[in-house]
Amino acid sequence: MTMEIRDKLILISAGGTGGHMLPAASLARDLVSRGFRVEVATDWRGHTFEKFFGGLTMHVLKSGTLHQGFIRKITGPVSLVIGIGQAYRLVEKLKPIVVIGFGGYPSFPSVYVAQNKKIPTILHEQNAVLGRANIVLSKRADRIALSLPHVEGVSDFDQPKIVVTGNPVREEIGRLYALPYPLLQADGPLRIFVMGGSLGAKVFSIVVPAALARLPAAQRARIEIIQQCRSEDIEAARDTYTRAGIKARLETFFHDVPEILASSHLVISRSGASTVAEVTTAGRPAIFVPYPHHADQQQKANAETVADQGGAWVMTEAGFTEDALLARIETFLQNPETLFRAAEAARSCGRPDAARRLGNLVVALASGWDHVRSYDQED
């Protein structure tokens, strides 16, 4: 790579939720390590993830889409038009050589403007279902990077542009890929990590403590649980665990997720794209309870990609009952080899080098190389 290419700017555009911003941050760190200048375009929500981008300049743009409800049907398109105008001025000022979109409507304006200005663009899709913004932008994208080999919504026209890179995770998570599954003995502790997800997952605070409290006393003594709870649910959950004699650490947010994953035997969580990427990279079996209210059921599709390989169990929220979870946990306690086998199956779905692979794709496009698959090989 010439110094002229390395010194030029890459613009990353991402929706304002963790599912979009955290993979974007991982790519940003990879590109900075290669010598590129990197700046980020997002919305006001995305700016709250500033700490993950290591001091990179972040630009807050307006964005919008059509929603149900009269007011939103008016304000959505207006905000989107304003965002496109802001993105036009930003792209004119920065003159990026490549623009990468990570999905979500806040990613749309910058990628749309870049495509109109004939600047090379890459789309990254984290989920097993192509998002609506990426569907609209895919026809004019130069490359489409997927986290999973099979993604719903990818058209036949898009197939030549597809590269499966995986979903970038934090370096601290990536290092877990090489670590062995924690020793799980027939009479030893079973460490469970319950992640609530960005939407709270009140169901976990209700069902998990109640189910575990029904275990026989000898089995309750083996349980060690770390659980994310919403602030309004945490005391009730803590009281249930205390009365059951179960060792529990409950927080509304965890800053040491890599360390927790490293010592956990089982994860119970939603199945957002970033969560699935982190859990599989760490090689941890999971009970996934997909968020049920997405129109495209993207979390269900994400979870099933791991379950199909034997690395997870998928339970609908309606089916995530005390009885169902109790039966599952009792099986694990009695047959620890079930979790051990599932851990290796989960690890087979992980891609700890996803940020590097996506970075290779950026380098190839920035350099003007024509061989579509050349950047998907080992360095």
Image: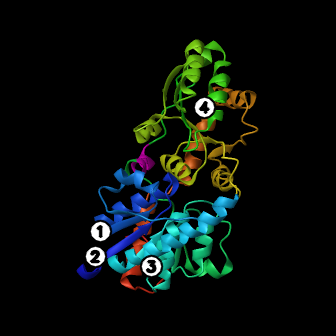
Residue 26 lies, in percent from the top left, at: 40, 58
The residue tagged 4 is 336
Question: What segment is highlighted magenta in the picture?
Answer: 173-179
Above or below, 195 against 164 in this view is above
Residue plotted at (45% across, 71% down):
100
Residue plotted at (48% across, 46% down):
282
The residue tagged 3 is 374
Q: Nearer the viewer, residue 99 or 371?
A: 99
Q: From the viewer's perspective, is the residue at label 3 or at label 2 nearer?
A: 2
Q: What amino acid is found at the position of numbered circle 4 in the picture?
A: Pro
Characterize the local packing of mark 1: few (<14), some (14-19) or many (20 or more) Cα atoms within 10 angstroms.
some
User: Could you tell me which secondary element the residue under label 4 belongs to?
Assistant: helix
Q: In the image, 263: left or right of 237? A: left
The residue tagged 1 is 34
Q: Earlier in the sequence, mark 3 or mark 2?
A: 2
Q: From the viewer's perspective, is the residue at label 3 or at label 1 nearer?
A: 1
The residue tagged 2 is 6
Q: Kindly report the secondary structure that dominates the magenta region of the rendered protein.
A: helix
